[in-house]
Structures are given as C-alpha cells and as structure tokens.
Amino acid sequence: MKTRILAFLICVFSVSESFAQTGGDHTYEFLNLTHSGLVTSLGGSNVSISGSNLNLSYHNPALLNSGMDKSFVLNYVNYLAGINYGLAMYSRSFGRTGNFAAGLAYLNYGSFTEADETGLVTGTFGSAEYAFPVIYSKTIDSIFSIGIDIKPVISQFERYNSFGVSFDIGASWHSRSNNTSAGIALRNAGIQVTAYAGEPRQKLPLEIQAGISQRLAYAPFRFSLTLRHLEKFDITYNYNESGPIGEHGDAPSGFLDNLISHAVPGVEIIPHKNFYFAAGYNFQRRKELSVPEGSASGLTWGFGINTSWMDIEFGRAVYHIASSSTNISLILRPDRTYRKAR
C-alpha cells in the first residue's frame, strides 16, 4: 500500500517546467498568501512542522491531524496599500476515516472610484477574491500521512467575475520522538473554469514546496528550512534601467543566486511550551524588493502565546522599505473551553 502511495506522489510531484511560476504570470495569485502568524514569522512558507496548529494544514494538507480535532482558527492580515485578507477554518477528526477541515479564505482589495472615459466620477466599486478550502488527510501509519485540499475559487473585479478550482496534495513524515519532521506539497494545481470577460483561461500559480524541521532535544530551539518553487530552478530576476533581464535577457542569474532564492530558513525559540519567538528570512523577497538605499526586505519575525484552549500568534513580514504586513492568528479549541468551565 505504501509503495503505491509513494509512487503516486512521485508522479504528481514530477511536474514539467512548463508549469513553472513567476509572479504576475498566473491568475488567483492570492492563493499564495500566508495567513498564519507562525508561518509568516518563519519566512512565509512552511510545509514541515508537525503539531496541533490547524493553520499549518493550509500550507500542506498532510499536516492536518487528530491533534487539531475541533480546532477553530481566525486569521487577519493587514496587508499592503490598504488591502486586507484572512482565513477562518474548522476541523474534525473521525478515527480511521481520517481528518477533515473546511473554511473560507478571502482577499479584499478595498473600494475604488469608478469614472467614465471623460473622467466623470460615476460611483465606487469593490474587488475581492474568495477560496473555500476543504481538506482531508489520512494517517498511513504513526509517522507518515498524506492529504489533499480542494479549493473552489471565486474572483470578482468590478463587474468582471471568474470561477476556478484549485487543489493541493501533500505528504508528511515525523520521527517517533517528533523532534524531526518533513513534508512536501504540490500547491495550487487546478483550472480556471470561467475567465474574466471572455478572456482566455489563465494558469493557476502552481508550486512545489518541500521542507524539514528539527527541534533540539536539549535546547529550546526548532530550525526549519523550506524550499520553494521546486518545479523551476531559475526564479530570479535581474534589473537594469531598461527593465527586467535574466530569465530571457542577456544577463542570466548565477547558480548561487538561483539556488539561494529557493530557500526560506526559519528558527523558533521555545523557552516554555506556552510561548515562542520566531524569525525567518525570505531570500527571493529580499532579492526582488530590496532597494540600493538599504532595507530589511525579506526579514520576518513574530511571537505566540499558547494555552490548552487558545493560541494567539503575531507575525510581521517586511516586504519593502515602504511597506510591511502584520498577521494576527487566533486558534481556539472550544471543546476544551467547555470542559474547563464544567
């Protein structure tokens, strides 16, 4: 059984480079946004941490487990230029049947002024995108699990609408001590069912991620390394006064630049089970958004307070010298609250 499952996953993850992602080339790019305060503080990507944090299953559906049973998460992100987005999700576990979670993710672009071709203001309009993740995972044995996440997507820009279906598939493993864990996920595969205003259908932002996390046995540290865009090696861009060069231009990026741009390292300091501080670095974000004057682009940090029935997480990501995002996550376990009240 395990051999057939592994063979299937290898086939799924062996994706042609023709599906490679670069920013702005695909529709529904909001599916790549990070909702979790913890994941934000670790650089914005993580598919390997094994635990009871329901938010982790949005990045790798195989991380959904019975420890997340009856968890409810609320995430809010104050993003760039007045944009905000969030995620709400609830999970249930049913023994040998498996683990389920469902929720709503949204991105609100705000309100815009509407005008005709002469510049006469005629009103206002809004733009927003929504995804409805439905996650299922199954534990194959005590240390290995697989999962799938199906996400219907609705996108609305003024009077132009689009509908699509995205899915993620992943696998995860952790040691019996739970100090070491690893994961791999194919994210945002799928199809745009209906395009905007009759335009040709666009590809979704497909991406393959893999990672490993290691908690030290006798020190309060957990280190994580996530590799992004494994479906394509060259994800870097160089810029000059004429615009971007490198991928198809006359100054291709070097091997080391390409290699390091895939990496997202992170570290957690966990002095007590009820508190953590985390920091990370996104090399691709730093390379693409830093300015010659200097900035902290790519740097992320955050902290969390954990209790038996509620977790609060805060994450901060620096994108550019002029803008950063703030993530706030609330993880509730209502059944434990009721049990405590009794």
Image (cartoon, rainbow, N blue to C red):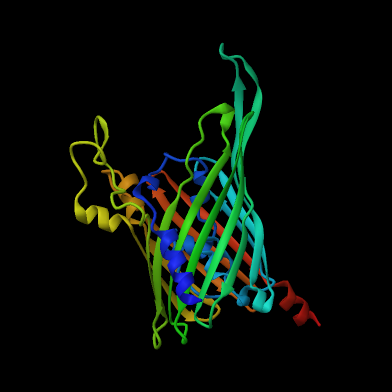
The answer to whether 119 is drawn above or below residue 113 in the figure is above
Whether residue 19 appears in this view of the structure is yes
State the residue in front, 267 or 256.
256
The answer to whether 307 is drawn above or below residue 34 in the figure is below
Number of marks drawn:
0
Whether residue 21 appears in this view of the structure is no
Task: Describe residue 82's horizontal placement relative to residue 100 as left or right.
Answer: left
The picture places residue 63, in percent across and down from the top left corner, at 53, 70
Q: Residue at x 48, y 63 (%)?
A: 39
Which residue is most to the right? Answer: 342
Q: Residue at x 61, y 23 (%)?
A: 114
The picture places residue 90, in percent across and down from the top left corner, at 68, 64
Task: Describe residue 136's horizontal placement relative to residue 322 as left or right.
Answer: right
The answer to whether 317 is drawn above or below residue 10 in the figure is above
Q: Quadrant of residue 150?
A: bottom right
Q: Quadrant of residue 259?
A: bottom left
Which residue is most to the top? Answer: 118
Q: Residue at x 81, y 83 (%)?
A: 342
The picture places residue 206, in percent across and down from the top left corner, at 45, 50
Task: Describe residue 205's horizontal placement relative to residue 246 as left or right.
Answer: right
Q: Residue at x 65, y 27 (%)?
A: 124
State the residue in front, 11 or 155.
11
Q: Quadrant of residue 103?
A: bottom right
The picture places residue 28, in percent across and down from the top left corner, at 52, 43
